[in-house]
Amino acid sequence: MYILESCKAGRTIEVRKMCVWGKREQGSRRKKKQKPSTEEQLAANLKNAIRKLTRTMNTNFGPEDYHLVLSYRKEEKPDSWEGMAADVREFLKKLRKEYKKQGIPWGYVRVMECGKRGARHHHLVIKGIKPAIFRSCWDKGWVGCYPLDESGQYKDLAAYFLKFTDEAVREGILKHRWDSSKNLKQPEIHRVRVSRRYFRATPRIEKGYYLDKDTVQEYVDANGNRQFSYTLIKIRGDTS
């Protein structure tokens, strides 16, 4: 069975062509399905998590928003993930009041960085507000505030975020790789069944978009299914 998936997320359109081994088509020979190894499955889980976070970031954030990094002074560093989680919850509680007071839309995604050498940081992508507000709500250390670029494609930032929690998830320390506010929009995903002839590893560029060449991939997933994917990015200033 051949599936075409199109995901509209902000300024991007991600296209995936998937060959899924369901019912055997007449005259075809089914490939014997093999159970993926643990390492293959873990790698696949991370890849899927990056895809989901990328779509969430692309749908909800843009150049008016920020990548925020919250650091700790030495004497303020917590000893555990739980301590870090409590700190960032308190920060977000204070911050949300400021957004509400100023009538600014609220929304964020976040991860925690807890390095083996003692690094303690919170990374967030968050809706734009005056940077001084972030500093007034975080009293445990330093705040780095970096505007997002204008592309609307934040796959590299999503991968960067999830490298901090991958090991903790693998070891069962964390249940979730990332967290977010509950009001974020969901990307628009459409799936249709297509013929075998349609499954060609060639990107189709839509009018008003350009191809992100770094996203073009043809591979076999952990379940033995062939996939081809790529992402298009809307040309700035195009109104079509």
Image: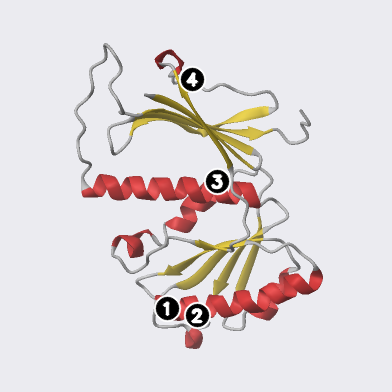
Crowd rating for badge 3 (residues with CA inside 10 Å; few <14, some 14–19, many 20+)? many
| Secondary structure at numbered mark 1 | helix
| Secondary structure at numbered mark 2 | helix
CA separation, marks 4 and 3? 22 Å
Give, as a three-letter code, the residue at label 1: Glu
Label annotation for residue 61: none
CA separation, marks 2 and 4? 48 Å
Direction from residue 234 to residue 89 in the image, left or right: left
Label whose residue precedes the other's in the sequence (3 or 1): 3
| Secondary structure at numbered mark 3 | helix
Residue bearing mark 3: 55
Residue bearing mark 2: 86
The residue drawn where x is 65% and y is 53% is 148
Give, as a three-letter code, the residue at label 4: Thr
| Secondary structure at numbered mark 4 | loop
Residues under numbered marks 1 and 4 in contact, where contact means CB atoms less than 8 Å apart: no
Give, as a three-letter code, the residue at label 3: Arg
From the viewer's perspective, is the residue at label 2 or at label 4 nearer?
2
| Closer to us: 31 or 48 | 31
